[in-house]
Amino acid sequence: MALSQEDVLAQLNQLDITALLSDLVARPSFEREEAVGEYLMGRFRSLGVDTSTTEISPGRFNVLVHYGPSGQQLILNSHMDTVPPGDETAWSMPPLEPVVRGGRLYGRGACDAKGPLAAMVAAFEALVRSGTPLRGRVTLMAVAYEETGALGTATEAQRLSGGQMVAIIGEPTGLELHLAHKGVLRLGIVTLGRAAHASVPQEGVNAISGMARVVGALDALGADIARRHHPLVGYPSLVVTTIQGGVAANVVPERCQIVIDRRLIPGEDLEEAHREIETVLQNLQSADLILRMESEVRGAFPSSQTAADDPFVVALRDAGQKALGREVATGGFVACCDMWPFRERGIPAVIFGPGELAQAHTTDEWVELAQVEAAARFYALAALHWLGAEP
């Protein structure tokens, strides 16, 4: 093991991870991941490893590569897609022209999640180049659609079968080992009234006034559920995030719509969270039979958790000690991520990566290059510790 570790780290030190990350950031992937996927396929093929893809939709696909024999499997999973740059004039540099300054690399996706992805690619390449024989297989999944519904990872998880599997999800955790994440339920809620001239409002039913009562009741529900707590991810939440209503200044509005974002902690159930909201709406409906309300699910992704005493977690703590030179802190990921498709299939999974979640989706997004390099060491040594080098 010691010799294999030295070989792998020596190969890792020869890789230009900054150049790799720059290449990823320079390729736009906020509407389709094709440019990043093709870059990775070319890189892996030049390495001499078999590369496959899974099409999710036209121009959007996952990239998969494997190293080692079948049997036990360690999955390194991170996403190629990013959120859009937003107002590019607000950036201090073009968001798709990566800049290195003060030990940081700036650009859209540098933190979420091309930093973790670059570290995983580097770790995988170091394992291959070292020729280290393993007792199992390392699979790198570079996936699509994480930012808009987890469809890339969910598709791959459904195809997994046989053998003992574990997974590391590459997200910005500040090099902490996160064992849980929040789920999310998004609902669109519409109040339907009756239009009238604003000079005779009594002839109509004001959908905006009705929605004001809905928002007040949902705020009260949000305050109630915020009394719940999880030791790793904190508190659940419910917040109104968008509102639309009315057609003109002199018309009583007949329609108003909001979208709510409900975050769930491990132990909370999506169906129960939905029922809590529907109960609030039904109570308001019964109080005003003239005003009608409708709701529609816009997205639902469960929370998940892996036990702190799982053997995989114990092995990763050991790998982290060697990779980082210190004990790896554990915590929870307060956003949603692609861990849940694995946990739903009973696969132990954790979240780990360079960068801070506070930098994700921001203007002038950045990641510490030293963290990216440390994460690459962690992923590589995690493979050695979990799969073990053959004698």
Image (tube, grey):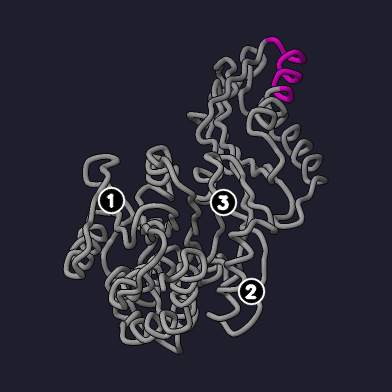
Secondary structure of the magenta portion, mostly? helix
Q: Which mark is residue 3?
A: none
Q: Is residue 259 left or right of residue 97?
A: right
Q: Residue at x 64, y 65 (%)?
A: 314
Q: Which residue is drawn at 32% across and 76% down?
A: 98
Q: Which residue is drawn at 71% across and 46% down?
A: 236
Q: How far separated are the C-alphas under marks 1 and 3?
A: 29 Å
- Camera-side mark, 3 or 2: 3
- Which residue in the structure is indicated by mark 3? 348
Residue 142 position, x and y percent, is: 35, 56
| Farthest residue, direction front | 391
The span shown in magenta is 279-289
Q: How busy is the neighbourhood of tag 2: few (under 14 within 10 Å), some, or many (20 plus)?
A: some
Nearest to N terminus: mark 1 or mark 3: 1
Q: In this view, does 234 lie to the left or right of 38?
A: right
In reply to whether residue 347 is colored magenta, the answer given is no
- Which residue in the structure is indicated by mark 1? 32
Nearest to N terminus: mark 3 or mark 2: 2
Q: Which mark is residue 328?
A: 2
Q: Which amino acid does label 1 sit on?
A: Arg
Q: Which amino acid does label 3 sit on?
A: Pro
Asked if marks 2 and 1 touch (Cβ < 8 Å), the reply is no
The answer to which of 382 and 351 lies nearer the viewer is: 382
In reply to whether residue 285 is colored magenta, the answer given is yes
Determine the secondary structure under disc 2.
loop
Q: How busy is the neighbourhood of tag 3: few (under 14 within 10 Å), some, or many (20 plus)?
A: many
Q: How busy is the neighbourhood of tag 1: few (under 14 within 10 Å), some, or many (20 plus)?
A: some
Task: Name the image quarter holding the C terminus.
Answer: bottom left
Determine the secondary structure under disc 3.
loop
The quarter of the displayed image where residue 288 is located:
top right
Q: Which residue is drawn at 50% across and 74% down?
A: 378
- Camera-side mark, 2 or 1: 2
